[in-house]
Amino acid sequence: MDQEIKELLQANIELSRENNKILKKIRGTQKRAVITKILYWIIIIGIAVGAFYFIQPFIQKILDLLPSLSGLKNLPDFSKFNGMLPK
């Protein structure tokens, strides 16, 4: 082979190796980004579930109280006092 072709092949091989290293770093970064995003959503969902678990007794008390509030339908009609109320 001609010396010039050998030099061109050697330069091409060096560029290919350098590109391969760069591509491997890019792919590693992409994998870490995906893992980080998955962990982020797991934490967000976990906090939401934990918060619901924490406030669930309070919500249950309010839901138990709602049927007893339905007895407030028998209140007097205050609409006749509408003109007397200050604005």
Image: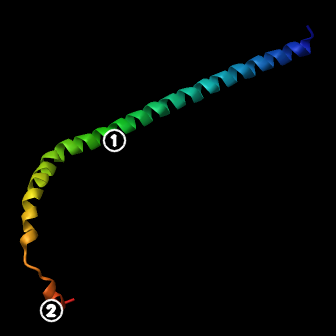
- The amino acid at mark 1 is Ile
* In front: label 2 or label 1: 2
Q: Quadrant of residue 39?
A: top left
Q: Is residue 58 left or right of residue 33?
A: left
Q: Where is mark 2, residue-wise? A: 84
User: Where does the image place residue 26, in percent across and percent down from the top left?
Assistant: 59, 29
Secondary element at tag 1: helix
Above or below, comparing residue 77 to residue 26 in the picture: below
Secondary element at tag 2: helix
Q: Residue at x 17, y 47 (%)?
A: 55
Dot label at residue 6: none
- The amino acid at mark 2 is Met
Q: Quadrant of the image for the N terminus? A: top right
Q: Quadrant of the image for the C terminus? A: bottom left
User: Where does the image place residue 54, in percent across and percent down from the top left?
Assistant: 17, 44
User: Where does the image place residue 45, in percent across and percent down from the top left?
Assistant: 32, 40
Above or below, comparing residue 17 to residue 60 in the picture: above
Q: How is the image coloured?
A: rainbow
Above or below, comparing residue 29 to residue 47 in the picture: above
Q: Where is mark 1, residue-wise? A: 44
Q: Is residue 74 left or right of residue 86?
A: left
Tags 2 and 1 in contact by the CB under 8 Å rule?
no
Nearer-the-camera pick, 44 or 28: 44
Q: Residue at x 63, y 26 (%)?
A: 23
Above or below, comparing residue 73 to residue 62 in the picture: below
Q: Residue at x 17, y 87 (%)?
A: 82
Mark 2 / mark 1, whichever is N-terminal: 1
> Could you tell me how far apart the alpha carbons at marks 2 and 1 are, in whole angstroms?
52 Å
Nearer-the-camera pick, 68 or 47: 68
Q: Is residue 71 left or right of residue 56?
A: left
